[in-house]
């Protein structure tokens, strides 16, 4: 597994490049299928959830090799060869993401072995080229840093909270909520909307309602 943090001189404080939506792209090399899946991911929780979905979508594959890059005070990067020879899968996948300066993104390259060994150079080329092929199919956008809203409240307060969130935020697709005796959830929020959001949260809480919230980086 590869792990790194960028130095302070390369910290990202403004907008960054990422993908607008999920992309899957496939190439075949010497009878092996390589399928690159690009997903938006703001943190490790997002990665874990998307990884489960990708494995479910492509079951019984030989390998699920991956890399991600998260926007934070420093750029957080991790990659895994997932059983392939060291340095032949995770690094080229991560290198492809870095080549296009993409952040808050994960790439999983699923391999179905076709019976012909590709060797070290062949694997590096296959994993890197499949990732680049997916990136070239994607719509690249400029986004802004996000903070994560964590909340816990009763159902009636959740309905009020949801209406306020929908009024402030144009995209609610990243909302992750769990329903038991209370509602708990998390939602990435653009920094530019944070002051307005916090004012709304404080207004909801001011009446003594059971809304607990916290805003964190990840």
Image (cartoon, rainbow, N blue to C red):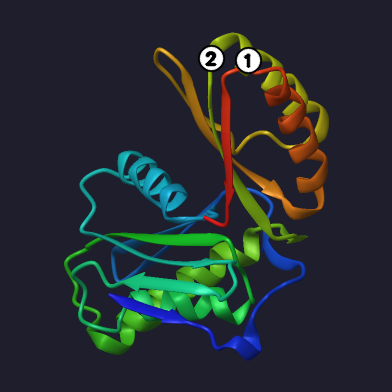
Q: Is residue 26 toward the left or the right of residue 119 in the image?
A: right
Please state the horizontal and vertical placement of residue 127, each as a whole percent of the image.
39, 73
- Distance between the Cα atoms at labels 2 and 1? 5 Å
Asked whether the residues under the numbered discs 2 and 1 touch, taking CB atoms below 8 Å apart as contact, a structural biologist would say yes
Q: Residue at x 22, y 62 (%)?
A: 113
User: Residue at position x 36%, y 72% from top?
Assistant: 79
Quadrant showing the N terminus: bottom left
Which image quadrant is residue 199 in?
top right
Identify the residue at image location x=58%, y=35%: 213
Front-most of 173 and 32? 173
- The percent coordinates of residue 68 (x first, y second) are 46, 66
Compared with 88, 23 (above or below) is above
Q: Which mark is residue 154?
A: 2
Q: Is residue 111 left or right of residue 203?
A: left
Residue 90, by quadrant, is bottom left
Q: Residue 126 vs residue 153: left or right?
A: left
Q: Is the residue marked by circle 1 packed among few (<14), some (14-19), or many (20+) residues within 10 Å?
A: some
Is 185 above or below relative to 76?
Answer: above
Q: Nearer the viewer, residue 216 or 100?
A: 216
Q: Which mark is residue 104?
A: none
Circle 1 residue: 157
Q: Position of residue 101 (x, y in %)?
A: 64, 76
Q: Nearer the viewer, residue 72 or 41?
A: 72
* Label 2: few (<14), some (14–19) or many (≥20) C-alpha neighbours in 10 Å: some
């Amino acid at each position: 597994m590869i792990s790194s943090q960028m130095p302070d001189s390369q910290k990202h404080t403004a907008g960054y490049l990422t993908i607008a939506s999920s992309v899957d792209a496939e190439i075949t090399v010497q009878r092996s299928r390589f399928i690159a899946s690009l997903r938006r991911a703001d943190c490790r929780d997002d990665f874990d959830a998307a990884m489960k979905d990708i494995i479910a979508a492509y079951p019984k594959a030989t390998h699920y090799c991956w890399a991600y890059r998260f926007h934070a005070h420093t750029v957080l990067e991790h990659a895994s060869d997932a059983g392939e020879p060291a340095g032949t899968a995770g690094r080229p996948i991560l290198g492809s993401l870095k080549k296009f300066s993409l952040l808050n993104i994960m790439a999983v390259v699923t391999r179905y072995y076709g019976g012909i060994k590709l060797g070290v150079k062949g694997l590096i080329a296959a994993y890197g080229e499949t990732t680049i092929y997916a990136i070239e199919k994607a719509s690249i956008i400029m986004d802004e840093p996000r903070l994560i809203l964590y909340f816990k409240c009763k159902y009636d307060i959740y309905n009020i909270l949801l209406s306020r969130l929908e009024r402030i935020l144009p995209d609610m697709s990243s909302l992750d909520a769990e329903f038991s005796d209370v509602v708990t959830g998390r939602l990435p929020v653009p920094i530019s909307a944070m002051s307005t959001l916090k004012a709304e949260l404080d207004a909801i809480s001011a009446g003594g309602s059971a809304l607990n919230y916290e805003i964190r980086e990840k």
